[in-house]
């Protein structure tokens, strides 16, 4: 799953680059700093994707670690709060590919 998480981080960073490179205040070091700010925190049921910008930490989303009654391993879930995902619907699956994300988080339904 680590390889798929790396691909997800690449996709998140690519979207950030596409958004920031349009600005007249674009600085390439911002993209590098953003890519380095992405981390994974492992919980009991989920992997929490965290981005740290400056002195702020924000949850990007969650990845399901193992199959449960509603979701498959690798499903991408939007954050409902700092410690819990929104369990209404998966936004894609990192193991299957073909997901739509933004640098700010998984796509809305």
Image: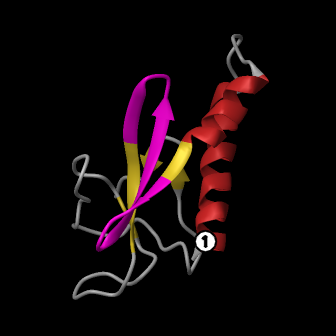
Residue at (52, 54) in percent of width and height: 101
Query: Looking at this view, is 42 or 74 the one in front?
Result: 42
Q: Residue at x 67, y 17 (%)?
A: 23
Prevailing secondary structure class for the magenta stretch in the rendered image: strand
* Residue behind mark 1: 2
Q: Quadrant of residue 109?
A: bottom left
Image point 46% across, 76% down: which residue?
Answer: 74
- The single residue placed furthest to the top in the displayed view is 25
Q: Is residue 47 magenta?
A: yes
Residue 26 position (above or below residue 15):
above
Q: At which x and y percent is residue 84?
A: 22, 57
Residue 83 rendering spot, x and y as whole percentages: 23, 53
- Where residue 30 sits, quadrant-wise, is top right
Quick check: 28 above or below 32? Answer: above
Q: Compared with residue 71, is residue 101 higher up or lower down, i.e. above or below?
A: above
| Residue 60 x, y percent position in the rendering | 42, 47
Residue 95 sits inside the magenta stretch: no
Q: Residue at x 52, y 50 (%)?
A: 39
**In the displayed structure, would residue 13 be above or below residue 7?**
above
**Stretch in magenta:** 40-58
Left or right: residue 23 versus residue 59 is: right
Total count of labels:
1
Q: Nearer the viewer, residue 20 or 47?
A: 47
Residue 19 image position (x, y, % from top left): 63, 31
Q: Residues within 10 Å of mark 1 (few under 14, many from 20)?
A: few
Which quadrant of the rendered structure holds the N terminus?
Answer: bottom right
Color encoding of the figure: secondary structure
């Amino acid at each position: 799953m680590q390889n798929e998480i790396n691909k997800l981080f690449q996709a998140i960073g690519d979207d950030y680059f596409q958004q920031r490179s349009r600005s007249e205040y674009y600085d390439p070091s911002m993209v590098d700093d953003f890519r380095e700010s992405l981390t994974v925190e492992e919980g009991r049921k989920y992997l929490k994707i965290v981005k740290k910008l400056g002195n702020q930490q924000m949850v990007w989303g969650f990845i399901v670690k193992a199959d449960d009654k509603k979701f498959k391993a690798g499903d991408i879930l939007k954050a409902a709060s700092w410690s819990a995902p929104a369990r209404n619907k998966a936004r894609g699956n990192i193991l299957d590919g073909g997901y739509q994300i933004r640098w700010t988080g998984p796509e809305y339904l």
